[in-house]
């Protein structure tokens, strides 16, 4: 049974309708987002199911998962706090911000809090250079921006994220 | 006072709502075109305006549209909303705050080349913008501005959003097409160009968000109106993204040909804490560095004048470096970016960005050998002219010009 198809029948139809009928493979990226929504990463089963829906080889799908940084191949925290440290942000203190944030939370870049809720990551430019330090939070099938941050405001937000025990 | 042409939301509250946008003359250009103009007339008006691509290359938009052949169908239009160049954040503001002007531009471009499906490719991080645009598109369908038989004519048009997933390279137009087609975002060998062999192998126009946001004004008011601003060869206004060591970073809509000095000091409020300006990167991380002397500061920011300084205007994402910034550190940041974003398809870029990042890193860490500065320069020059797409070429710009203009910054970090 294809659980993805069973769970999101209308969403999948709407996605497929965006592309020419003989170009189903175009739907692979939106389907990967759909598959990642709940588990927070791409499961082996999801690869199999997308492969069935799109009639596309699993290895091709896996190579796409590996290519794009917003798809996760391994389980991580429910929320990925992704701090930009590229040049424009770094000129406004993003490196120091990230360092202090990690020290406050007590984990290193790439690690997850012991409760499994938050992973802190360092990422490339997010088009928020004028509001640095800034980061995005990826999780629960959504991405939100948090700009003009201080270490205090970020620590507070992470605490809120960690308190969200119930499903979104 | 209504002064902005692109960032009109700064003059008109709630222009992101369809009612307000229409009350301010929105979609009159689209109506004028679809109900009363031939597609070729729309194309010719844009050609006459001299509008140049705002994504970085500065290629004339009307000319690009005119390359679409009329013996191969269907045609597609793709809006490049992948905005990922470090230092660039203008398309985001347009789509968030003045979305209908961008959508109307996309619709006019589609009509001009008679495309019936158009795609908006957004970087994956613009998740919420994509959701918002989906809602705007649904509103336009409900209002009869999109869909079948628009304004009772035979013309039909559908718009679709497509989200990327975190890959700078997808801003390169052929990589972007590969990504929509469900492949890894790796550039295609060109020719054939997208105008002939584009999305799904069909003739395709790809324009940046800001480029498209210029089109409704051109169709509504004419090419001469558009040319009132800017210079002869670089007409119109441009949204400059100003970032780095300035008091007031942000987007500033100014005529092309405005000087660096005016942008950085009059609009950007100058350099923080009384420090002095050291260098300018006019096109984000892809820039050739410009030493900020009086000649540079008084240079007009248009495509030709910035090129004459040995740099490029690109997407006009101006990153300011002050005298506290070590250029070797800056270079280590940009090459680290390009190393991460290299798609791996061609060897010079894949290996070159890796080694440049490796060498720059050990220079910054004070762990380099005497010959490392020359080695870094040598690797960069070896890459130039040999990469499949512009990413590889861009990755060398800050390296070569940084060493050329500020070699002492590199030497300072070496062990004595």
Image (tube, coloured by chain):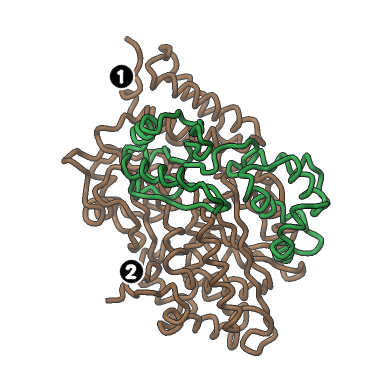
Chain colours: A green, B brown
Report crowding for label 2: few under 14, some 14 to 19, many 20 or more residues within 10 A (C-alpha): some
B198 horizontally vs A104: left or right: right
Q: What is the residue that sits farthest to the left in this orientation?
A: B274
Rendered image quadrant of residue B406:
top left
The foreground one among B189 and B248 is: B248
Q: Does residue B313 appear in the picture of this structure?
A: no
Query: Which residue is under mark 2?
Result: B10
Quick one: quadrant of the C terminus of chain A? bottom right
Rendered image quadrant of residue B253:
bottom left
Q: Is residue A102 above or below residue B277?
A: above
Q: Is residue A11 above or below residue B414?
A: below
Q: What is the residue that sits farthest to the top in this orientation?
A: B416
Query: Which residue is under mark 1?
Result: B412
Q: Earlier in the sequence, mark 2 or mark 1?
A: 2
| Distance from the alpha carbon under mark 2 to that under mark 1 | 45 Å
Q: Are marks 2 and 1 on the same chain?
A: yes
Rendered image quadrant of residue A74:
top right
Q: Does residue B352 appear in the picture of this structure?
A: yes
Report crowding for label 1: few under 14, some 14 to 19, many 20 or more residues within 10 A (C-alpha): some
Q: Position of residue B296 (x, y in %)?
A: 29, 45
* Residue at image location 64% in from the left, 51% down from the top: A33
* Residue at image location 55% in from the left, 63% down from the top: B131
Q: Position of residue B399 (x, y in %)?
A: 44, 31
């Amino acid at each position: 049974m294809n659980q993805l198809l069973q769970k999101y029948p209308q969403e999948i139809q709407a996605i497929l309708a965006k592309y020419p009928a003989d170009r189903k493979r175009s739907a692979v990226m939106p389907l990967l987002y759909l598959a990642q929504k709940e588990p927070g990463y791409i499961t082996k089963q999801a690869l199999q199911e997308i492969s069935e829906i799109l009639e596309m080889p699993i290895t091709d799908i896996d190579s796409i998962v590996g290519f794009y940084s917003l798809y996760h191949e391994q389980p991580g925290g429910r929320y990925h706090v992704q701090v930009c440290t590229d040049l424009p942000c770094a000129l406004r203190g993003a490196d120091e911000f990230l360092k202090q944030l990690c020290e406050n939370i007590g984990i290193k870049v790439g690690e997850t809090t012991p409760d499994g809720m938050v992973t802190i990551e360092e990422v490339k430019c997010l088009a928020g250079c004028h509001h640095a330090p800034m980061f995005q939070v990826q999780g629960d099938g959504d991405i939100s921006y948090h700009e003009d941050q201080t270490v205090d405001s970020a620590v507070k937000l992470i605490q809120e994220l960690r308190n969200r025990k119930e499903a979104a | 006072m209504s002064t902005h042409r692109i960032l009109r939301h700064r003059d008109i509250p709630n222009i992101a709502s369809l009612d307000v946008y229409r009350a301010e003359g929105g979609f009159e250009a689209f109506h004028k075109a679809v109900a009363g103009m031939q597609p070729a007339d729309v194309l010719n008006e844009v050609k006459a305006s001299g509008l140049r691509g705002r994504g970085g290359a500065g290629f004339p938009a009307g000319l690009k549209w005119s390359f679409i052949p009329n013996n191969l169908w269907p045609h597609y239009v793709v809006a490049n909303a992948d905005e990922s160049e470090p230092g660039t954040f203008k398309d985001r503001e347009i789509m968030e705050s003045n979305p209908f002007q961008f959508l109307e531009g996309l619709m006019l471009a589609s009509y001009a080349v008679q495309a019936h499906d158009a795609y908006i490719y957004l970087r994956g991080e613009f998740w919420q913008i994509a959701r918002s645009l989906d809602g705007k598109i649904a509103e336009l369908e409900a209002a009869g501005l999109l869909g079948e038989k628009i304004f009772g004519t035979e013309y039909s048009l559908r718009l679709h959003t497509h989200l990327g997933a975190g890959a700078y390279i997808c801003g390169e137009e052929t990589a972007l097409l590969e990504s929509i087609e469900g492949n890894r975002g790796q550039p295609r060998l060109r020719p054939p160009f997208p105008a002939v062999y584009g999305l799904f192998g069909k003739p395709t126009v790809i324009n940046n968000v800001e480029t498209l946001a210029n089109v409704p004004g051109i169709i509504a008011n004419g090419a001469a109106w558009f040319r009132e601003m800017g210079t002869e060869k670089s007409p119109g206004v441009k949204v400059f993204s100003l970032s780095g060591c300035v008091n007031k970073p942000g987007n500033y809509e100014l005529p092309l040909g405005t000087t660096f000095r005016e942008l950085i000091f009059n609009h950007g409020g100058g350099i923080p804490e009384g420090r002095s300006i050291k260098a300018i990167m006019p096109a984000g991380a892809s820039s050739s560095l410009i030493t900020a002397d009086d000649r540079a500061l008084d240079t007009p920011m248009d495509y030709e004048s910035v090129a004459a300084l040995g740099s490029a205007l690109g997407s006009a994402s101006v990153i300011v470096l002050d005298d506290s910034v070590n250029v070797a550190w800056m270079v280590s940041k940009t090459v680290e970016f390009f190393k991460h974003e290299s798609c791996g398809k061609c060897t010079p870029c894949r290996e070159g960005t890796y080694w440049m990042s490796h060498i720059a890193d050990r220079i910054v860490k004070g762990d380099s050998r005497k010959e490392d500065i020359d080695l870094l320069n040598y690797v960069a020059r070896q890459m130039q002219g040999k990469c499949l797409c512009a990413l590889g070429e861009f990755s060398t710009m800050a390296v070569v010009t940084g060493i050329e203009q500020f070699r002492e910054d590199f030497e300072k970090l070496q062990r004595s």
